[in-house]
Image (cartoon, grey):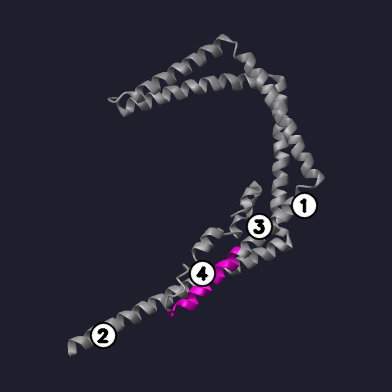
Amino acid sequence: MRFHTLHPVASLVVGFVSSAAVLAAAAPAVHAADRQPTPTDPARQKMAETAKAATAAEKALTDAQAKVKKAYEATPEWTGAVGAQKDAQAKYDAAAKAVVQKVQGTPAYKTAVAKRQAAEDNKNKLRSQPDVQPQQVTDAAAVAMTASNAVTKIEKDAMAADPAATEAKKALDEANTKLNELRKGLADKMKEDADVQTASKDLEEKKKAVEDARKELASQAAAERERRAAQRTQSSGGRRGR
């Protein structure tokens, strides 16, 4: 689906759209111009036409969705929420950086970092040894993970204890919540839009036509194989009767 590159909320309507590549792949291969016609040619042509129509219907749906998205994201409410979220994120990043820089100078943090590095070095050393046992590597990896978590915990505890960082985190959470609510509103707009609904219905019909054409082609191809097998059997029997 192409619309998913436009915005994460497109995942809420992804059920409406199938891959154009899959639809195109369902079309029959083009044969050389001098190939002799076969009884299945009309079905093959129909398959190609329905696949092409489905691809066009998919594009129409993607365009309709993009139109709704563009209009929605031009509203003052959306642009304001996006701006507020970016501002809150920048303030939180600055507060977090200040806290981490401060805690990095403490003896406890330096000790934890040293233990983490030693655990990582030991894990990597064991992995490079040809005769090492798998359990040894597993145990070393667990120790390294524990040491890494200890460093992270010191940073998180320092963040939680810092008033400025706590306030910045609260503001960021609120901004993210607001933006997520608006994203849900965009998804609702997609579902309610008349053009999107029409395009979605048309795509579903075109997809069904592709499936019907595929079944028809498969049925005719099977019948043609049976007919040729019967001809070969009859021809072989006629030669033996001479």
Q: Is residue 186 above or below residue 134?
A: below
**Amino acid, disc 3:** Thr
Query: Where is residue 75 shown, x and y percent of the image?
Result: 80, 47
Nearest the viewer among 103 and 177 is 103
Q: Which residue is mark 1?
A: 71
Q: Are marks 1 and 2 in contact (CB under 8 Å)?
A: no
- State the residue at coordinates (51%, 69%): 211
Query: Which of the labelled discs sits on residue 104, or is there none?
Result: none
First to last magenta residue range: 37-55
* C-alpha distance separating marks 3 and 2: 55 Å
Magenta stretch, main secondary structure class: helix
Could you tell me if the residues under marks 4 and 3 are in contact, i.e. CB atoms within 8 Å? no
Q: Position of residue 142 (x, y in %)?
A: 42, 25
Foreground mark, 2 or 4?
2
For marks 2 and 4, the one nearer the N-term is 4
- Of helix, strand and loop, which one carries label 1? helix
From the viewer's perspective, tell me whether residue 129 is left or right of residue 209: left
Q: Amino acid at mark 4?
A: Glu
- How many residues crowd mark 4 within 10 Å: few (<14), some (14–19), many (20+)? some
Give the label, 3 or 2, closer to the camera. Answer: 2
Residue 211: mark: 4
Identify the image quadrant of residue 78: top right
Q: CA distance from mark 2 to mark 4?
A: 36 Å
**Residue 53 highlighted magenta (yes or no):** yes
- Distance, label 3 to label 1, CA atoms, is 14 Å
Question: 220 or 177, which is in the foreground?
Answer: 220
Disc on res. 62 = 3
Determine crowd level at label 1: few under 14, some 14-19, many 20+ residues with C-alpha closer than 10 A. Answer: few
Residue at numbered disc 2: 235
Amino acid type at image mark 2: Ser
Q: From the viewer's perspective, tell me whether residue 27 is left or right of residue 78.
A: left
